[in-house]
Amino acid sequence: MEHFEVNYDGLVGPTHNYAGLSFGNVASLANAKASSSPKDAALQGLQKMKALHDMGMKQGVLAPQERPDTHALRRLGFTGTDAEVLYKAASEAPAIFQAVCSASSMWTANAATVSPSADTANGKVHFTPANLTNKYHRSLEPETSGRILQAMFENSRYFEHHKHLPDNEHFGDEGAANHTRLCNEYGHAGVEVFVYGRHAFDSSKPAPKRYPARQTLEASQAIARLHGLSEDNTVFIQQNPDVIDQGVFHNDVIAVGNQNVLFYHEQAFADTDTKLAEIQKKFGNEGELHFIKVATDDVSVEDAVSTYLFNTQLITPPNGEMTIIAPTECEENPRVKSYLEGLVSQGGPIKHVRFFDVKQSMRNGGGPACLRLRVAMNDEEIAAANQNCLMSDALFDRLNQWVNKHYRDELAVDDLKDPALLEESRAALDELTQIMKLGSVYAFQRD
Ligand SMILES: NCCC[C@H](NC(=O)CCC(=O)O)C(=O)O
């Protein structure tokens, strides 16, 4: 049996915009109110997916969500026709209105936590959508994420789906952005590393002071229990509270793992030596485990946050030469560029670097790694998954046509209350569910 890592990238939704919604995420605040290009953003995302597909990777697509979310506005007491609901919310509660317009489901690293079958007690692939409680605009995602994931991985012989954790900050969960998996081969049992920002039930423990810690230890432990992971293949590490206060709002802004490599900044974790020793012990001695530490003297936390050096994808193409997929911001920063040149020329496990323009996403604080959800599967599981969500030359052409037909070239914050945008968005998503054979996953299709 063969084993693969499939990267499911989020398709950028038709309301992609910059609203400054994420306190603690430096790029989101810096670009608040800039006008956006939903079409460019969606096409940029598709280019990246196609490039990885052309490198021989298994590449998937995850559908966006329905925005503006009129159902969320009705729940908050806005009434009338959809156009009236939009108009009243935009004029009476503009901040809430902007939140329900966000296309933030594009960052699918936050859609769910996934444990491959090799790690779980019942031998199935487990999915738990992230509740994303820390930000209102993101807390609107989990129900629909759950429905989309079920439509993509339907066969209960191979796949098990859990409900998102309780919608409460005590169980704040941000999904795979705070989770990585180390293994010799994708099909071997791996060590699942959960990184949390604070303890919810013990206020004596260290926590960030300036910006929120979005993930709690208790949430990570609950996911590990739900997925049937064992103590022998799980490690919980606290993120260094000081780096959260410098804008590292998820672990995937300061560390990334793939197979037997953990690439991390020296300030990423609290209690680093003890925790890396625990990872090494649980990984075992069967194969070599590489810890690639980046020193502050080589790359500062500030440079890591502005270039997203660690929000890169570390992938293993079929030729086995591990490659780093980096945003062009890394190429434009001389210190980070020279670090990466050194990294790939020193004979270590990472052999190549490739730069991608994902600026439309970067301006909201989302790099290449934020845009993808990893699902490691064997060939039988891949065959049991929804084939219409896997990238191919035909799907690439079809989705490009779909974006060009439905998406606007430019969107300003003021355009969001235009009822025509809601209609355009619903028409686009209705067609998409047919292209990707998802069924009626959106609220507007189920009313
Ligand atoms: N993993 C990357 C997630 C980025 C995302 N940004 C946002 O939601 C910004 C949206 C805005 O500001 O319009 C977040 O912070 O959760």
Image (cartoon, rainbow, N blue to C red):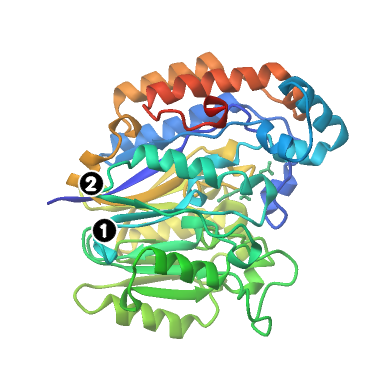
Q: Give the x, y percent position of residue 136.
A: 69, 49
For image coordinates 40% across by 35% down, the residue present is 61
For image coordinates 45% across by 62% down, the residue present is 179
Amino acid on which disc 1 is placed: Ser
For image coordinates 70% across by 58% down, the residue present is 24
Whether tag 1 and tag 2 are in contact, CB under 8 A, the answer is yes
For the residue carrying disc 2, how many other residues have a C-alpha within 10 Å: few (<14), some (14-19), or many (20+)?
some
Q: Which residue is mark 1?
A: 117
- Is residue 275 toward the left or the right of residue 330 in the image? left
Q: Is residue 318 visible?
A: no
- Is residue 82 toward the left or the right of residue 127 in the image? right
**Given the current orientation, which residue lies at the most extreme front position?**
447
Instruction: For mark 2, give the secondary structure.
Output: helix
Q: Which residue is mark 2?
A: 381
Q: Is 192 or 159 nearer to us in this picture? A: 159
**Given the current orientation, which residue lies at the most extreme top position?**
405
For the residue carrying disc 1, how many other residues have a C-alpha within 10 Å: few (<14), some (14-19), or many (20+)?
many
- Is residue 28 toward the left or the right of residue 84 in the image? left
User: Residue 417, relative to residue 198: is it above or below?
Assistant: above
Alpha carbon of mark 1 to alpha carbon of mark 2: how far?
A: 9 Å
Q: Give the x, y percent position of residue 301.
A: 61, 65
Amino acid on which disc 2 is placed: Glu
Q: Is residue 74 visible?
A: yes
